[in-house]
Image: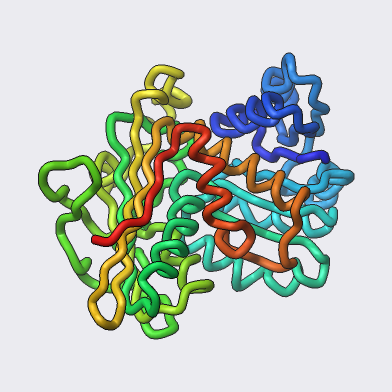
Amino acid sequence: MRIALNGASGYTGRLAAAELARRGIDAVLVGRDPRRLAAAAAGTGFEVRIADIGDPDALAAAFAGADAVINTAGPFAALGAPVIRAAIAAGAHYVDTTGEQQYVNAVFDDFTKDAANAGVTIVPATADDGGPSDLISRLAGEAVGTVDTLTAALWYRDGTFSRGTLRSLDPRLLFDGALRYEKGNWSTYGEASRTSWRFPGTERPVPVSKAALPPVATVPRHLPLRRMEGMLAGEFNALKNGIPAAVIDAAPEGPDDEQRRQGKWTITVEAVSDGGRNIRGEVEGTDSYGKTAVIAVEAARRLVADGAKSGVLTPAQAFDPESFLGYLAGHGVRWRVVEA
């Protein structure tokens, strides 16, 4: 098994490279900066290949011989499509770490046919927010029976963001541009259905606002339901007015090891049936960037080792939800499905 890691010299990319090395998975590190890639490869024995997304032939050549590609280089709306095309041209499966809701929809719209024709599987949003939320939504929906509405809420707290995350964040798309799924279509909408949310382990509801969460783009593709929306709590809401580029450029590349360990993330979904039965799915963890590396590497490994239907799939379509969440439990992620 050989995995190509695009964006390997970035903050999340280096964590993914370390995870590949920890698991003993052969990898080739791909990017445009030879010096930074060499630093990312130090001590791993991984091959380094130089390619820029502006050169599709060079990018496909960099992926040649790889069984799968992990893409950690965002913003994905601007940089993701060329990497998917190159993976398809190289005959490699593909996963990425995007959390960009509109981009996830675009991947399904633009690449399903090409991936199927090439016999490869594309799974976007295999990160801390998109992967577990899609998997737990599937389990909550199956537990409730016939789903009428499903709501997902995400809360980051006690952590800091990487420079890449801040650069990828478009407040207009994350908040005002958030999509809601309703009666077979995705569209922007006005106010969220709630202004507060009960997260596990809290004494009182937490304020939330509507947000473009990736599971709203994935869950309706495998779980029949009438309506779904996403909501966000915590520090991200402080970014609604945007951040000046100069401030982002001056920020640290990302949280240090201790800051990563202190950061917490919680995903809660509520699936409500036609008859009013309510099932909650909960996933909690720490170190969102480290867990993203774990999720992306395991997703790519499973595509190669176990296979999946070709085309573009959601995490819950590509992988068994209980098995994948069970694997994450070995990395300190807690999850459960309970009657609300």
Q: Look at the image and tell me whether residue 317 can be seen.
A: yes
The answer to which of 189 and 141 lies nearer the viewer is 141
Residue under the image location 34 percent in, 38 percent down: 244
176 vs 13: above or below: below
Q: Is residue 20 left or right of residue 61?
A: left
Furthest residue to the left? 204
- Judged from this view, the residue extending furthest toward the top is 43
Quarter of the image where one finds residue 88: bottom right
| Residue at image location 75% in from the left, 27% down from the top | 24
Percent coordinates x, y for residue 317 in the rendering: 60, 64
For the N terminus, the image quarter is: top right
Q: For residue 243, which quarter of the picture?
A: top left
Residue at screen point 16% across, 48% down: 206
Along the line of sight, the residue nearer the viewer: 55 or 62: 62
Which residue reaches farthest bottom? 183
The residue lying at 64 percent from left, 47 percent from top is 299
Residue 175 shows in this picture: no
Q: Quadrant of the C terminus?
A: bottom left
Q: 308 or 159: nearer the eye? A: 308
Q: Can you say whether 218 is above or below 69 in the image?
A: below
Q: Is residue 278 above or below residue 202?
A: below
